[in-house]
Amino acid sequence: MSGFLRTEKRRNAKAWVTVLPSGKTVQVARGAKLLEAIAAAGETIAQRCGGRARCGECHVLVRQGWRGLSKVRQAERDRLTQLCGAESLSRLACQAALGVHNKVVIELINH
């Protein structure tokens, strides 16, 4: 397969995200943030900082597919360490982008 076809295939790749507790599953483009997947599932999640990892209101737990998400960057790590209830499965939906794995299950946190 030519390099162009492989690149095009990756660019158009989709990922499946299941949002708990509703159990709704949506298909979104790889590279999309979890925040976009949550909205596509018809769920709402608070966010005051405009996706800059400052408020922590979009805190979610990744129940499956952790390795399929982007790496945790310093700003997100800093905010997560300050959040009550954050754990090893915690991510900020505004920062976590969908990557190589095509199935991710997240749980919304009620603040």
Image (spheres, helix red, strand yellow):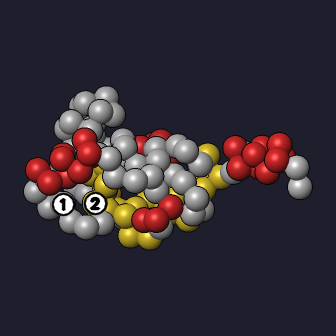
Is residue 5 left or right of 89 when viewed as pictured? Answer: right
- State the residue in front, 111 or 34: 34
Q: Position of residue 107 (x, y in %)?
A: 35, 62
Count of all numbered marks drawn on residues in the image: 2
- State the residue in front, 20 or 88: 88
Quarter the N terminus occupies: bottom right
- Whether tag 1 and tag 2 are in contact, CB under 8 A, the answer is yes
Q: Residue at x 18, y 60 (%)?
A: 86
Dot 1 falls on a residue whose secondary structure is: loop
Q: For residue 86, which numbered disc appears in the image?
A: 1
| Residue ranking furthest to the front | 3
Q: Position of residue 24 (x, y in %)?
A: 50, 60
Question: Callout 2: 10 Å neighbours few (<14), some, many (20+)?
Answer: many
Marks 1 and 2 sit apart, C-alpha to C-alpha, by 6 Å
Q: Amino acid at mark 1?
A: Ala
Q: For residue 5, which numbered disc appears in the image?
A: none
Is residue 28 left or right of 81 when viewed as pictured? Answer: right
Is residue 79 left or right of 46 when viewed as pictured? Answer: left
**Residue for badge 2:** 90
- State the residue in front, 85 or 67: 67
- State the residue in front, 103 or 100: 100
